[in-house]
Image (cartoon, rainbow, N blue to C red):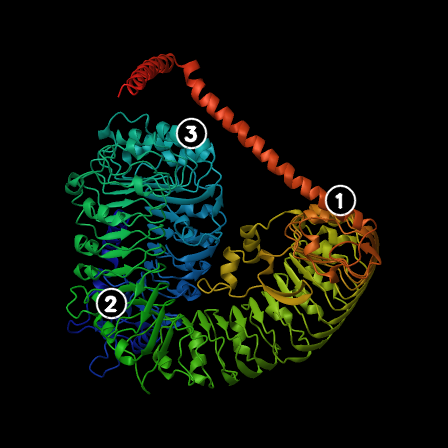
Amino acid sequence: MNAYFLKTFYVVLLLSSLASGISATLKNSSESGEAKCIERERQALLSFKQGITDDFGVLSSWSNHRNNTDCCKWKHIQCNHQTGHVHLLDLNGNYDYSQPLRSVLNLTSLTHLTNIQHLDLSHNYFVMIYIPEFMGSFSNLRYLDLSNSYFSGRIPSTLGNLLELRYLDLGDNYLWGEIPIQIGNLKHLQYLDLGGYFLSGKIPYEIGNLRKLQYLSLGSNTFLDRMHMENYISDSLSGAIPFRKGNLPLLRTLRLVGNFDIKVKDVQWLSTLYCLTVLELSSLHSLKSSRQWLQTISKIIPNLIELRLVDCNLVDNDIQSLFHSQSSNNSISLTILDLSFNMLTSSTLPLLFNFSLHLQELYLSHNNIASPSLCPNFSSLKILDLSYNNLALLMFMENFNISSKLQKLHLAKCSIMDRSFLVSSSSTMNSLSSFLYLDLSDNLLKSSSIFPRLSNLTTNLRTLYLDYNLLEGSIPHEFGKAMSSLENLYVSNNKLQGKVPSSFGSMCRLQRLDLSSNRLHGKFPSFIQNSSWCSRHIFRVFNLSYNQFTGNIPKSIRLLSELEFLSLQGNSLEGDVTESHLSNFSKLLSLYLSHNSLSLKFVSGWVPPFQLRFLFLASCKIGPNFPSWIQTQNSLIQLDISDNELNDFVPEWFWNKLQILYTLNMSHNNLIGSIPNLQLKLRLRPSIILNSNKFEGKVPLFLLEASELLLSANKFSAFLCVNVTTTRLATLDLSANQIKGQLPDCWKSINRLMFLDLSSNQLSGKIPISVGTLVKLEALVLRNNNLTGELPSSLKNCNNLIMLDVSENMLSGPVPPWVGESMQQLIVLIMRGNQFSGNIPLHLCYLKRIQLLDLSRNKMSQEIPTCLNNLTALSQKSIDRAETESRVHWYNTTYYEIYNFFGGSYYTLHITWMWKGVERSFTRPELILQSIDFSCNNLTGEMPKEMTYMLGLVSLNLSRNKLSGEIPLEIGNLGSLDSLDLSRNHFSGKIPSTLSNIDRLAMIDLSNNNLSGRIPWGRQLQTFNVSSFEGNVDLCGKPLEKSCPGDETVVKSKGAEVQDEDHSVFYEALYMSLGLGFFTGFWGLLGPLLFWKSWRMAYLRFLNRLMDYVSVMVEVNIGRCQRWPKD
């Protein structure tokens, strides 16, 4: 929040400094005698509006009405009152509603505003479009703010032409690449924010010449995004800090994020920044090792109000050296301190307390803090972040001091368990009257008793995160009443059961409720259906996805008129959804109904009141007709209408939607007809998924402008890429179609392809040489065609391949040695079912990452190479799934330039493999299989002993060759083996007894060899079918019916042995139990008497009393006996 006010201060300061230059020109043109706006500029603004989706009426005053022709009177615009030129366009979207303006089209219409001086498009949703180059043509521009608007791509170097610019903010966008050196031309610049998430390279030294600069931010903390996108690998700024003493003398705010190589001489520059009040140095991993830098930061701390040293590998001693020179609390004015992503322990907390008089925000997430009991009372603290530490000790007890002013507490992923979260008394509630925000997500909380504990904590809580815990049981009914102050409640990804409490209807401030991914069941929550529910006019987000709700969606859901996000997917809901359910949702942006048993039935011509961004209806029944109401949705970013029982032609208007979509999924329907070859520009590079339909004809050229095009299992008959100039296509899957003729020779124009799958077509002829230009290619799948000739040598340029599958063709010639030399990234190599000949090249042993190697059904000859033990991945007992997956779908700035940011890649590797004698399909085989298949060739010689070192092998097939010699005794080392086929060879000798040690072996075939002797007796081999061993004349023993010599005698003697063994076992058990009983009884009684004197004395007293008692009883009984005769 402080950062926002600081930015506002800079804006006000800048505008006031510019007042003498432009204040006279920014008067409203409503005054008499002022010039009206220029017609060309008015049309440009109207054209700009046409490309914008304005859900909140921000541009409602922009119209072509005859009484409203003066654009200078429109809202958010100011003109020069003398010339009528537009000087200011302020469309800042930082209002109560988020990102009011959305656009997926280009902004070229703004080029006509040649006299503009102030342009603000910040806090909008421009859907990852690139910052246009023409921005550099606004020679009069003094203020440019494009921050937080989802722009992507590289920073245009043309911005360096804006020589009058004072303010430039491109922060919080998805920008990548290097910072243009032309930024150094902007000599008047006072505010510069280039905080793009994925910027890389060095800081241009030219920026140091911007002597008027007061605010500088370069780079951005991407860790916050990585917490939600853990697979993503971001680049960062690096190299030297180029600034020298005398550079940037007026700097007040400095934010540098990157792994810079800091030098001692750099610190001299930092020490001369006398105006500095805000300092951020993040990802500066070498800071810890530079004593001079730490000393300089320590000296300037008294001048700072904000200090952020994030991800700098700092330890407790470093913090002590930073603050050791500060004499007292009064010497420090810090209000914000961020030491996240370091290696600090609890010892740092008392030290910080000594200088915390003014501290309001303290961020210590991602450290090694383990004891919150050492946390002192920071009296002024409003925000405390201890997330991603190990706080397994007791919380919220008296020894955990919390400021009475505390408003936000972050405790995500702190290993907090039920016993760790206790609320001692009502005094806690009274001391936390200002407490508004609590994040307990991703912990180890299990009991639903957490809910009443939270009720005792505070009654003023506004936001509560309990998602990603282990919560079981039901949500108590009382919780809804006790926590009536809640505005945002997130309890997703737990194990909660039961129904949603009706007491949620008591939450009169509730705006966001997320109960997704639990085990909640029953009918639709009753409080939602209540027309008198006090929150229905402010309720904005409702997520019940992936639970077990049943029944119909009630029509009363339309009462939630302010709803923006509705997700009910992944339940067992049924029945019809009609326009009456949705007719009141004028603000709805996201609708998720996938994976239910719902039928969408809307009257013909229905026009929804909303403009959706995200629409997911997978597995709902919409068909058979194509849904015409989608034509009204002009803001869609992602659309999934897969498996909807659509059996219709796709109307032409629909294909125009691809210009605004990031993802389109219409797979698994029965859509028919051909796709028209329209003249469309797909600037957003969408992922288009049309698998498993009945599309036919040619693949239109405009589809090749997508980043991903999945068209498998259709009836396309032709794929032409002649005159294609696109470089955007990264994934092309045309498998299982009806494409005939030669493979097109046009791959130079699609040279960014990463995945190419043309399998199961009717392609013929040779593989064109131009395929070798696809140097980024990771998967080339040409399986099951009629291709002929040799593999072109140009393929060796494709050294990023992780999968090469040319199986089931008519390819011939030797297996080229360059496959092993140049393709060392290969994980999957399948050349099955061709006419390859010659020996298996030794160079294949260079494939250290190979997990699946299939050369079966060819004409390979000679011996199996003995170097196969160099195949490192097959020697590992398990697959490193995370490492393998990151290699298949790597994520960095190049990835974002190829794919769109939201779409990513939906293509997965899939193969066919001969598995246990049956051809099977496998999806994502690189994560589950480690196999070799050399079957059906003419291989000779022995099976190399080196093959038994491949401890990770799951399947090994060497059948139908001419291999001879004995099966290596070490084959028992292959403990992961599930399938072994050595049949139809010339193996001789005995079956190794070590084979019986492989517990996982589910299929073995040693038939039709020259094996002899007895089948080894063990846990496995006798359980297989006779067919696994037949065809070996000299082989005997179970499961074969042929007995071995001497078996009868052995059987009899074995019977006697078994009987004797039964008796011996009985007596052994008897003697053992007697011995144990004697030992236990003897030492159980006498042991204590021997070792403990008190026991011994008590025992002797007991014996004395017992003897006395016995003697007395004897005498009494004797006396009685003597009296009996007398009686």
Q: As drawn, which residue projects farthest toward the front?
A: 1126
Q: Residues within 10 Å of mark 1 (few under 14, many from 20)?
A: few
Q: Is residue 918 left or right of residue 36?
A: right
Quickly name the residue at label 3.
Answer: 292
Q: Position of residue 67 (x, y in %)?
A: 20, 82
Which residue is drawn at the image coordinates 23% and 68% (left, top)? 562
Q: Which mark is residue 1053?
A: 1
Callout 1, which amino acid? Ser
Q: Indicate the secondary structure of the residue bearing disc 1.
A: helix
**Label of residue 266 in the image:** none
Give the residue drawn at x 40%, y 64%: 135
Asked if residue 34 shows in the view, the reply is yes
Indicate whether 891 appears above or below 730: above
Tag 2 residue = 76
Discs 1/2, front: 1
Residue at the location (21% across, 42% down)? 406
